Image (cartoon, rainbow, N blue to C red):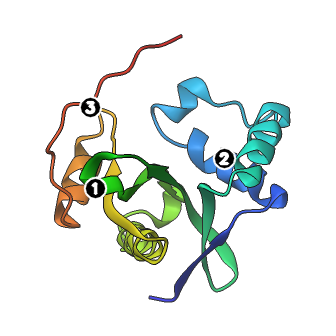
Amino acid sequence: MNITLRPATATDVPDIVAMLADDHLGATRENPAELAPYLAAFARIDADPSQHLLVAEQDGRTVGTLQLAVLYGLSRQGSARALIEAVRVRSGLRGGGIGGEVVRLAVEEARRLGCVLVQLTSDRSRADAHRFYERLGFQPTHVGYKLAL
């Protein structure tokens, strides 16, 4: 599979937002018609060297996206860990192995960045995603909590 990951640019934001909005959860919380807040968020992400908003391409076409955040801490003897967020594959291309390759490339990038662990969260309602991540070797070792502000 000829998938590459590259850093996103501001011109990728409309495609990324469209992918974020194109599922049952994103449809209720994203607004692709109003890009200003997404462009402002992109500028913050782009300015932070620990944040990596990535676009997956196949044959020059955007097919997916994810965000890889490097978290530094004292645990694990001061090791860095990577957090994968907002994994999306274009809806018409799901189920063909692109997502697995995108996550594999992100894990490879985390390793290159010196991370010793990759973690992610997935909404409880995404049962298919949970099976997908487990097939890729991720283990459901923790319970996650959120507090809306």
The image quadrant that residue 4 belongs to is bottom right
Is 29 rendered above or below residue 76? above
> What residue does disc 1 label?
77
Q: Which of the pair 90/108 is nearer the observer?
A: 108
> What residue does disc 3 label?
124
Q: Report the Cα–Cα distance between label 1 and label 2.
A: 40 Å
Q: Residues within 10 Å of mark 2 (few under 14, many from 20)?
A: some
Of label 3 and label 2, which has the lower sequence position? 2
- Mark toward the viewer: 1 or 2: 1
- Mark toward the viewer: 3 or 2: 3
Question: What element does badge 2 sit on?
Answer: helix
Q: Which of the pair 39/119 is nearer the observer?
A: 119
Is 135 rendered above or below residue 104? above
> What residue does disc 2 label?
18
Q: Report the Cα–Cα distance between label 3 and label 2.
A: 22 Å
Q: Position of residue 11 (x, y in %)?
A: 84, 59
Q: Position of residue 86 (x, y in %)?
A: 50, 47
Q: Position of residue 74 (x, y in %)?
A: 35, 46
Q: Label 1 is placed on what type of residue?
A: Gln
Q: Label 3 is placed on what type of residue?
A: Arg
In this rendering, position of residue 83 left or right of residue 33 = left
As drawn, the label of residue 101 is: none
Question: What element does badge 3 sit on?
Answer: loop
Q: Position of residue 45 (x, y in %)?
A: 70, 48
Q: Residue at x 43, y 71 (%)?
A: 114
